[in-house]
Image: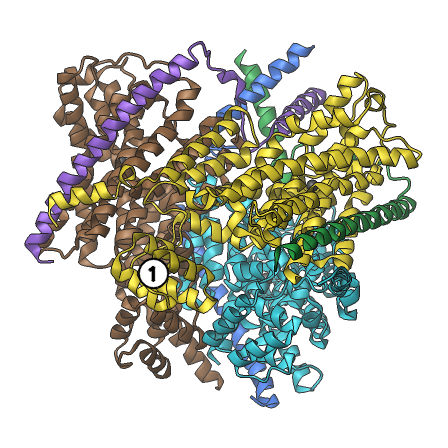
Chain colours: A cyan, B brown, C yellow, D blue, E green, F purple
Amino acid sequence: MDMVNKLEMLWHGSGVYNMTFGQFVMMVVCVGLLYLAIKKNFEPLLLVPIGFGGLLANIPEAGLAYSSVEQAIHMAKPEVLEALGQVLGVAASDPHALAEAYETSNAELHQAAVNTANDLGYSNGVLYSFYLAVIASGAGPLIIFMGVGAMTDFGPLLANPRTLFLGAAAQFGIFATVLGAVGLTSMGVMDFSLAQAAAIGIIGGADGPTSIYVASVLAPELLGAIAVASYSYMALVPLIQPPIMRALTTQKERQLQMSQLRHVGKTEKIVFPLVLLVLVAILLPDAAPLLGMFCFGNLMKECGVVDRLSDTAQNALINIVTIFLGLSVGSKLVADKFLQPETLGILSLGIVAFAIGTACGVLMAKLMNRFGSIPINPLIGSAGVSAVPMAARVSNKIGLEANPQNFLLMHAMGPNVAGVIGSAVAAGVMIKYVTAG
Amino acid sequence: MDMVNKLEMLWHGSGVYNMTFGQFVMMVVCVGLLYLAIKKNFEPLLLVPIGFGGLLANIPEAGLAYSSVEQAIHMAKPEVLEALGQVLGVAASDPHALAEAYETSNAELHQAAVNTANDLGYSNGVLYSFYLAVIASGAGPLIIFMGVGAMTDFGPLLANPRTLFLGAAAQFGIFATVLGAVGLTSMGVMDFSLAQAAAIGIIGGADGPTSIYVASVLAPELLGAIAVASYSYMALVPLIQPPIMRALTTQKERQLQMSQLRHVGKTEKIVFPLVLLVLVAILLPDAAPLLGMFCFGNLMKECGVVDRLSDTAQNALINIVTIFLGLSVGSKLVADKFLQPETLGILSLGIVAFAIGTACGVLMAKLMNRFGSIPINPLIGSAGVSAVPMAARVSNKIGLEANPQNFLLMHAMGPNVAGVIGSAVAAGVMIKYVTAG
Amino acid sequence: MDMVNKLEMLWHGSGVYNMTFGQFVMMVVCVGLLYLAIKKNFEPLLLVPIGFGGLLANIPEAGLAYSSVEQAIHMAKPEVLEALGQVLGVAASDPHALAEAYETSNAELHQAAVNTANDLGYSNGVLYSFYLAVIASGAGPLIIFMGVGAMTDFGPLLANPRTLFLGAAAQFGIFATVLGAVGLTSMGVMDFSLAQAAAIGIIGGADGPTSIYVASVLAPELLGAIAVASYSYMALVPLIQPPIMRALTTQKERQLQMSQLRHVGKTEKIVFPLVLLVLVAILLPDAAPLLGMFCFGNLMKECGVVDRLSDTAQNALINIVTIFLGLSVGSKLVADKFLQPETLGILSLGIVAFAIGTACGVLMAKLMNRFGSIPINPLIGSAGVSAVPMAARVSNKIGLEANPQNFLLMHAMGPNVAGVIGSAVAAGVMIKYVTAG
Amino acid sequence: MTQPDLMSEGINLMLFGMGFVFVFLTLLVVSTTVMSKVVGKFDSGEPEPAANRPVVSLNLGPAQDQKLISIITEAIKQHRGQK
Amino acid sequence: MTQPDLMSEGINLMLFGMGFVFVFLTLLVVSTTVMSKVVGKFDSGEPEPAANRPVVSLNLGPAQDQKLISIITEAIKQHRGQK
Amino acid sequence: MTQPDLMSEGINLMLFGMGFVFVFLTLLVVSTTVMSKVVGKFDSGEPEPAANRPVVSLNLGPAQDQKLISIITEAIKQHRGQK
Ligand code: NA
Ligand code: NA
Ligand code: NA
């Protein structure tokens, strides 16, 4: 091949020559995510890696987010398509049919297609490798959940266990959204399966790793949009929640001061994760991966004899996994997967989920005040959506506006961590319901 | 499927409905392990993750410790069993036969069964995935051994190399236990193969990662019991050793003060791991993985030019691996694998191993005093079993009881680290002997 | 098998009995590398693990650096060779032919051979497993490059972007070496393919992870020699560069003081990695893995909102990967792969590459002085080879010799980091050119 | 699965899911309350030795805590020496 | 590929590669210069809040920084108390 | 393998294993002693620069040690300023 050919090859292999409009749009979207993360402090720990991963994934011809077979199909050399077509039993002339046959092939054919692609010199993009190792394996979100467990203090919850009801009520946002998603489908506006609807609903759980875990199990094809919605709306909690909280409460209710929390002993804190685990074991084994790892992290923290493990779970380990989890989620922001009408549906449903969850938490608190003896400031109900610790801070802030002596932060931490448990339980139920369906 | 069916499905999928008596017993055992680790400070760094992993592994229906194929067989849907039976060439009617066929199948059939299970929607439990990555690969114990090497100071050993003989003698506990295990088998009480006997014997080496490594190579089916015995007895060193030490020594022997150790130079400490590695290379290549990684860790520590690597090996890296190694070992505490008569045999033989090792160390010290010129306090002989640094502390404590001026700690560190080398050598010999047999 | 047989077996399995002359030579070479790393401070962070990995790899019979199939072939039991021969379709009588058939086999046969070897009880050596996970996957060098990005300050480069030309010129060392390698082949002295020549050339880029990445893609069989040359010569920069710098500059040129660098704002530093990434995306997608991860690391550092991720990327994560990357590179120092005439060729060409790169950087600076208005001290041109931060320090030192007021360090950091970008771009071009050829 | 089915499945999932979440968390309230009482009986006098836990963890074992304190002490000395 | 071909391939790769490296870095010089100017216009008055960044990072979040400061304060007290 | 075989295999393994452990560690005693003597000759005057090694490691490079010291100094200043 002479010099001119090589120059032509370089030009034909360059990004300008190959960039699709979709890739361009996605790069703008990703720069937007980075802007929000860096300048507006939108959940930067996840949105910086996700946004950058999305940039990398949309570099034309680099194929960082594609598997070896997807790259082979994309390059569309006739002899390569021919070979893959033979393996997958599809006419080689249509790359789209090939790609679909690959995705729906059984494990044996899948492996055969991978072998063929490797033999022809194609290999997995690096982001795709990260995705396999961190998300497809299921390990990444669980390890992050372990770290979150090791950072969680159940003291406020143990001091006032009734706040668990607030965490339960706020999960209504999840199920209302599921209903919304199937409703849109019934009306013919969108086309979501029940599994997809369930994965979308979990955005309302306001819990990043839970969302990613559920999406990876029930609807991996929607993972990018769900994760982006989940973290974006968590960052928007200080904007979404206050109007709803103000609308549903009176000035007097907001001024209500709560009695100081009792002291919680060390032994209680050690035993609590075990009690929670036993309940999970007895009632809902499908929630065992998520809540099991969460309880393990919390036990490591509270038991006081494995501080070096707990510190690593809270620092080096969770940071490492966060980097690769973020990049892996970013790999799902490739234009042809993300720029779908479904994404708009997911983004709209997600914000509705947050709003409903917030409202239900507040209303539940008001209901409990009607029947219970110890008064609860309804502002802490909104913290039941989780979004730890942002939602609890919002409760505190609105409380202080109404009454400068009204420090609700510690009281709101109870429903806040209850919300984490609640959405993990909801995740387990949905996985059970959908996969058994 | 209607609502009632779904409720029934949830009930039939719940833990209460499915819990076997064995699982209940194992959960109690695991809570016991956690109690010992947290309240009694029994080697908590390993026993907390092992105990919690055991809890997770025994959650009914969660299948966290099972491979995809084991889960498929456990669920026992007729069409699934049929498909697996065809792949493995076994009648589908008998799940036990299927499970056994899967375990003994060759690599190709194994892969085919995995493919079938994956196609039918089953995937590996998360603890099983950890087990594959950390233990079955062999990497976990080796990385921990590297970290232990980076934490080990060979100074006391280099100041008095003769203490290596104490580390040699104490390994008699290992081989006596092997003999015990084959003896029990010959008598028909137990049924251990030579490989299993060797793996059990290594408990007497009082060295956690070595035990796990040897068990994973020679008898993975006994890994859970061996690891639990190993770490439990290491924690019991302060109870097991003193009576034996007192019984075998006179008050006068215990009062013996040893001369101060000479100063050991930096270059000696740098060269020592290389000398040890060369000896391994020349004499016993089968010990190369264990002792090679150990020497590497030690060289990183002593050379003084890669402190950031050495620090990571001693902190973040060893902590991360410890978390997953512990959970993986815990995954072997599933009821149907752990609640076997063999486990009782292993636990009984393990404690005998510790006792014999201790006794031989002490007796060797007395023997050396008879022939050598520089006197050795026989109390430091017991430290030769390893169990670093607990056994050395026990020597020091008993020494102080006999003579308040008698500080044996640094003297006991020599045989203590010699015991680590000794049991790794013994591990290499046994692996060589058994796998070549 | 009786006792005598067992002793014989141990003797026949020992290192002394099996050690080849090549293995002995390589152990001496590796001890030499460790000596240079520890006593002479030659890039110890990589050369300590590489040297030790090389020691481990050359332990006779331990097979730590070999795959399961290579071990099976090495043991050369007739029935094993027979089985492998049948799988690979080669006569079993010739182990060399078998080994070659295995290496050149397609993915399916490769897997079949691995299955056979596993069934017969052989498994991957631990260093080989590390190699697969860290280098063959491509992940290791990229993660290190991310960490390097998180440690890089582009401030000096942004203050004086023209220094990028120095970083460009110094890459001539790379391509001159490629020409040298193909020239030696044309003369019949060596026998390098174009891919191998390209991988050798990258040594001139003076950038460890880039070298390892390119070698792993284009010429994995030369990885050991290329990595050793790369890191050794980087350590020799203070010896190689000064004579060349002095020969090409006058005393007056060396005395030239540069004007102080302007202040660079935070926003510029945040936007720069994105600008660089966009250029890569537009022009050279093949450099996207390397420069993408590099820019990601740098963005994490500069954005200021993900400090915990940035710290982990710079510490725990890069340290962990460095340990395993070093050991993996060491695994390529097995005698039969390293002790080849090609290695001598690589070592000779590598040092020429460094010298030419240095010279071109200096000459480019002189050329720019002829045409530009703001004077550049030509001594900073040599820093364009990268070898961060050693080369910049050399520039500073020679500058101070000529003029005690002449602090060039910050000025030299511009071309120094430009050299990192330049060699990553060169890497991308070569990968594109060679793999498309 | 036809569209009306999907809708009713969604409603089922909602009723079912919220029901289960409430049942689960109610049981958790009950067991937590019981647990707190039981634990309270056993270590009633426990004055919570919070001060026993190290103030800084930093991935350090006790030995290194000592080191940290010693470097701080050293730093203080140096700091004073500079004056 | 015969040997003469290899030689010409090598020369091609050299010309081609060096050319590309220069084109790429020239474009980078241009875009960086433009970028710096554009950014300079937007946050001209930025006095670079370098002091805002924490002095020590140590993988600590802000909470733990507090702890570090408190242990230091404690150490100082102890140090004085010893005298 | 029949049971009596297993027993004799066990005895073999014991004799064999203990023998090897002793041989190995004896050789290690010898080579260590020789090594110490050889090394001792080469750097006899070495006064062991233990003080050269940093007191705190904490995964920090030298630059960060500086930072640690500077934050400590800062903390001391603040601490005094509070009074
Ligand atoms: Na939630
Ligand atoms: Na031992
Ligand atoms: Na370079």
Q: Chain of mark 1?
A: C
In the depicted view, which residue is nearer to us: B190 or B150?
A: B150
**What percent of the width, then of the height, locates residue F16?**
15, 40
Q: Secondary structure at mark 1?
A: helix
Residue plotted at (34% across, 33% down): B278
Left or right of A380, for residue C216: left
Give the residue displayed 37% in from the left and 42% down from the top. Answer: B44
**CA neighbours of label 1 inside 10 A, class few (<14), some (14 to 19), many (20+):** many
Q: Which residue is mark 1?
A: C117
Q: Quadrant of the C terminus of chain D?
A: top right
Residue C36 picture location, percent across and down? 52, 28
Residue B425 visible somewhere in the drawing = yes
Would you place residue D39 above or below residue A201 in this image?
above
Q: In this orientation, which residue lies closer to the viewer: B155 or A190?
A: B155
Q: Given the image, on which type of amino acid does mark 1 rest? A: Ala
Q: In which image quadrant can residue C10 be found?
A: top left
Image quadrant of ligand 2 equals: top left
- Using the rendered view, name the quadrant where residue A78 is placed: bottom right
